[in-house]
Amino acid sequence: MTAIEAAGLYAALCLILMLALKINVGRVRQAERVMFGDGEKEPLQRAQRVQGNAVEDVPVTLVALVSLALIGGPVWLVHSLGATLFLGRVLHAIGLGGSSGGSFGRMWGTLLSAIAMLATALACLWFVIV
C-alpha cells in the first residue's frame, strides 16, 4: 500500500464515521420530535456536538494527511496518524454520545485527535522544510 492509498483508507473510514454521526443526529431528532435546532433536548444537543466536533477536526486533518502522503511522508507515518485520528474520533463519539459529562472516551478521544492533528501538521512541516 502506498502512502496516498493509506491516506485514502483513513479518509474513507472517517467519511463512514461522519455519515454514521449524521444518521445518528437524524435518529435522535426523530426520537425527540425536534425538526429544527435542538429543542433544548440534551440527547439531541449531544448528538449534534458529537457530529460538530468531528466536522471541526476531521476534514482539516485529512487534508494535511493527504498532503503528507503527496509530499513523501512514509506509509507507516500516514497509517500511524490516520489510525490515531480515526480511533480518537470513534472514542470521542462513544464518550460524548453516552454522556454530556467527562468520560474515558471523551477525554482520550479528544487527546488522540489533538495529537493526530499536531503530529500531522509537524510532519508536513518537516517533510517540506527538510
Image (cartoon, grey):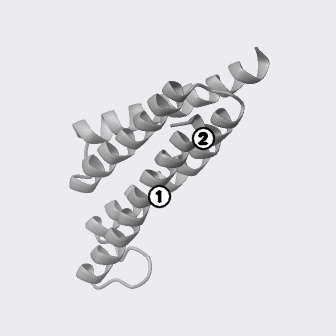
Is residue 108 placed above or below 122 in the rendered structure?
Answer: below
Residue occupying the point 63% across, 23% down:
122
Q: Which residue is mark 2?
A: 4
- Return the residue at label 1: 15
Rendering coords of residue 100 (x, y %): 27, 52
Q: Can you say which quadrant of the picture contains the C terminus?
A: top right
Is the residue 107 above or below the residue 10 in the image?
above
Query: Dot 1 surroundings within 10 Å: few (below 14), some, or many (20 or more)?
Result: some
The three-letter amino acid code for the residue at tag 2 is Ile
Residue 114: x, y in percent?
48, 33
Furthest residue in direction right, as rendered? 129
Q: Is residue 72 left or right of residue 57?
A: right
Q: Nearer the viewer, residue 65 or 93?
A: 65
Residue nearest the observer in this picture, 18 or 13: 13
The disc at residue 43 is none
Q: Is residue 120 above or below residue 45?
A: above
Q: Secondary structure at mark 1?
A: helix
SS assignment at label 2: helix
